Image: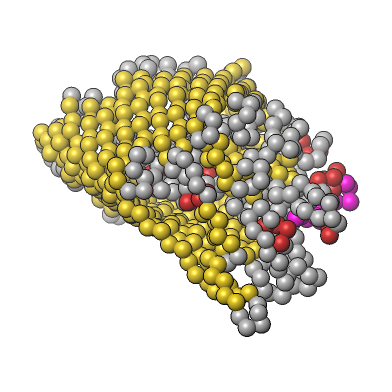
Amino acid sequence: MCLLLCGTRLFAQSNLSGTNPAQPTTLANSPTRDTNANKTNTAKWKTEEAHITYERLNTAKISIPDSSLHGFQHRPLASPYERDMGNLGSPTNNLLFTPEDRLGPTLGYHIFDPYRFNVDSLKFYNTNRPYSDFSYMLGSKLEQIASIMHSQNIKPNWNFMVEYHKLTAPGFYKIQRNNFDNFNLTTNYKSLDKHYVLYAAMVYNKEQHDENGGIVNDSELQNPNYNDRRTVDAAYQNDQYSLTRSSVSNVQRDFTLLLQHSYTWGRKDTTYNADSTQFTYKLVPHFSITHKMELSTEKHTYKDLTPDSLRYVTLFNQAFSNETNSYAFGEDSVYVQQKWFWVDNKILLNGFLGKPGKQLQFSAGIGDRYDQFISTPVSHLIQDSLPKQVYSIGRDKSSYINNYLVGEIRKEALLPGQWAYGAKTQFYFTGEAAGEFMFDASVGKELKKDIGSFVAGFKQQLNEAPYSYTTYENQFTQQSFSFNKESVTTLYATLESPRLRFSAGVKNYTIDNYIYVNENEVPAQYSQAFNLSQLWVRKMFKMGDFYLDNEIAYQQLAESAPIDVPKLMGREQLTYEQSLFKKALKVVFGIEARYTTNYHAAGYDAILNKFYYQSTYTTNNFPEMAVFINFRIKRFRAFIMGDQLQEFFVKNTITNVGTPVLNYNGTVGDTRLPVYATPDALIRFGFTWILVN
């Protein structure tokens, strides 16, 4: 068992309880330097409160790290409505439907996205003291997440941050091990005179997932002879290969570099302190130029070392010598690798109007993008003298150069009572992606006196099919698919009020030429336009020290659209929250229930590493239940949680279905539909420890 001191990335929770949890940025109990003049070398020391803030790319809003305790126990990494397949780190499917956000050429593998670092959403810190975040979570069956984050200012105007996550989860069932490594490094620099600003980042993600193909006979879940879930039969098990690792695996790796820097011209002013010993530059910007460069490489690898010909009938026909009672390593494996390399450069000219703090920024620019896709191996069939079919290893490479125009108008609400509005667009005018575009506009306001805020917006995208949907190649087959461009139009509005402990949102998607994987488990396109409407509401009630947190989401979908989502989902949490020992200890005791109405659970195709639409199996699940204790002592937060407690009453919640198993156990006509199920009841323990030097 690997025990590391590290930090779990948690799904951020709104502070709807109206409480004021201690923030690691301005802690009154922060350790301070000893200023006792009687001690050696301390006469010049001074007390300074810690200030830890961060910002993200392309926004002037300053945020502080989340230290809330109310929802600290929530499953890390994934959002509340994202459903995994019964093991932490397994592919996730968002039950609150969200189309793939893509523009221009893409590779198209997204089922590990919740576990990955994304360069566009990284945090760029500013700290007056070294700031570290160590966290660790341990669950049943050696489920572990560990990470470490450290941020420090090299100079008052120059910061760096480094963060590493490690996830391992063997799982309750056979051969479903997950092993992830995620790393990011950021730095930001602002010149003292405010003219030059630089943001740079590096991201590396690796997700390795062993495929078990699902539970072949779900009646075994109810059979007491299979109380040890590792004895339940799995579709891809091959005991002659390994009892602990699957011979079928999907691995995704990506590496990205980001450089964004700008130079600003404007009216400069200098402000001095009371005794004129220190000064600060202020700059009212009038005009700036920005250069942004991104370089990325992404690789997806599928391996099947013990293939079964019936497993691949939807894509190709091939007899394998491994389909015997003996296993010969390396004979007739199925190997698919797709690589994507791209470089994107753009130049923006920016102008500013208005008073400081209320400025309107408008930008226009041009970008150039190079994309290269490689599939390997591809089939080059050679006939030898026996005759015998021999396949040589080759590769298929495609390269594209695209150019695009970008424009943006933005006015942010930096103070309560201010309006925020903006619009941005990107349009490809040359290359394979010519004609594709994105337009996004929104308006909102930060209401005064902590009443809340609201945002309303409109977004439209026209994009091409990802490479992995149009191309499938290995040493036995070459498959290509052609699709029209997909159109997605989104209307949305959200409202949040910390004072009323209330938030709500509404969203409507209009989708035309929807690209998906159909029931035959091949890429397809639904040519009819359809609408999908969503409404969600969250309200917290406070009764003394008790909090009842209610969240409900409703989705209305066109009946014929090939999408698997429930109409109604909910999450209810009842907690008792109290401060003890003169508020030195804060504790939260709670119970939680999560439920959905019946729906067609999405199918999962391990060969394509994608979810597919299926209308055969309908879930009939009992609500998932949990109990937990969260507590905080100064900068140390921890939780103990009993999850999936419904397993004491029912066995086992079905999350997804798999690829049908043909002629099970060699019996012609005995076709099974495997399922993926939640784990048994389990215990999780986790902590986060903040260090501010």
Q: How is the image coloured?
A: secondary structure
Q: Is residue 613 magenta?
A: no
Image spot of residue 638 (x, y percent):
58, 42
Residue 41 against residue 392 in the figure, above or below: above
Relative placement, left or right, of 481 versus 573 is left
Image spot of residue 643 (x, y percent):
70, 40
Q: Looking at the picture, tell me which residue is in the foreground, 73 or 300.
A: 300
Relative placement, left or right, of 316 versus 448 is right
* Residue displayed at 78% across by 70% down: 324
Image spot of residue 142 (x, y percent):
67, 55
Which region shows up in magenta? 223-236
* Residue displayed at 36% across by 45% down: 433
In this view of the protein, can residue 621 be seen by the observer?
A: yes
* Residue displayed at 49% across by 40% down: 100
* Residue displayed at 40% across by 24% down: 457
Relative placement, left or right, of 423 versus 82 is left
Q: Looking at the picture, tell me which residue is in the foreground, 668 or 576.
A: 668
Q: Seen from this angle, which residue lies furthest bottom?
A: 385
Image spot of residue 646 (x, y percent):
76, 36
Residue 113 against residue 254 in the figure, above or below: above
